Image (tube, rainbow, N blue to C red):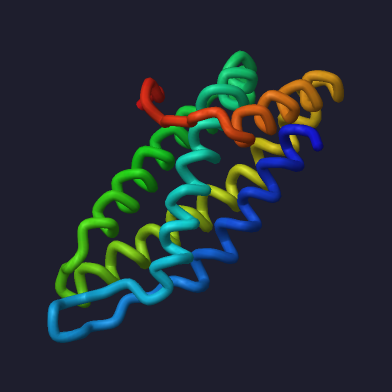
Amino acid sequence: MNAVEILRADHKEALALIEQIDVVEDKSGAVLVGIDSFNKLKDALKINIAIKEHLFYPAMEGFNETRPLIREAYSEHYTIDQLLNQLSTLPWSEGDAQGKLDELKTTIRRHVEKTESLVFPAAERLLSISDLEELGRRMEQMKSGRTVTASGRKK
């Protein structure tokens, strides 16, 4: 699979997982329903963010057409990371937790829509087929067993 195909599959997975997560109130405060899905989402997004920021975005930052979009994507990644961390530290009041979860879902959906409608078509125009395939190969390597961290990301 090439880089765009891999990232589209990651987006599809993230969108499916966010639909399985909700917040309910119990006697100790707000709790996440679908905690397994939340943990899967958190892990999947950390890997997705790392491969984008270490491989895909550097390849796209060299083009005037995509540079502003990539800068905005870094900012969205930072917001997503912060929301995931905040939701990991429940209990909150139900309203606060629901607000954070809603913000996370909205940010992910907006990021996916913008990336798929603007960045991916540009990547397919601006990068060669062999470049996209090489990026995909490197993404697969990063995903398959190598320790991935999001440290060192541009903010």
* Above or below for 18 versus 11: below
At x 29% / y 46%, what residue is drawn?
82
Residue closest to the eye, 133 or 144: 144
Residue closest to the eye, 22 or 65: 22
From the viewer's perspective, is 50 left or right of 26?
right
At x 25% / y 68%, what residue is drawn?
97
Image quarter of residue 65: top right
* Above or below for 99 versus 134: below
Image quarter of residue 131: top right
Residue that lies at the very extreme toward the top in this rendered image: 62
Q: Position of residue 48 (x, y in %)?
A: 54, 40
Q: Position of residue 85 (x, y in %)?
A: 28, 49
* Above or below for 106 versus 10: below
Residue closest to the eye, 26 or 94: 26
Image quarter of residue 1: top right
In the rendered view of the protein, which quadrant contains the C terminus? top left
From the viewer's perspective, is 84 left or right of 125?
left
How many circles with numbers are drawn on the protein? 0
At x 22% / y 83%, what residue is drawn?
25
Q: Position of residue 141 (x, y in %)?
A: 66, 28
Residue that lies at the very extreme toward the right in this rendered image: 129
At x 56% / y 56%, what residue is drawn?
14
Q: Position of residue 84 (x, y in %)?
A: 34, 52
From the viewer's perspective, is 11 left or right of 50?
right
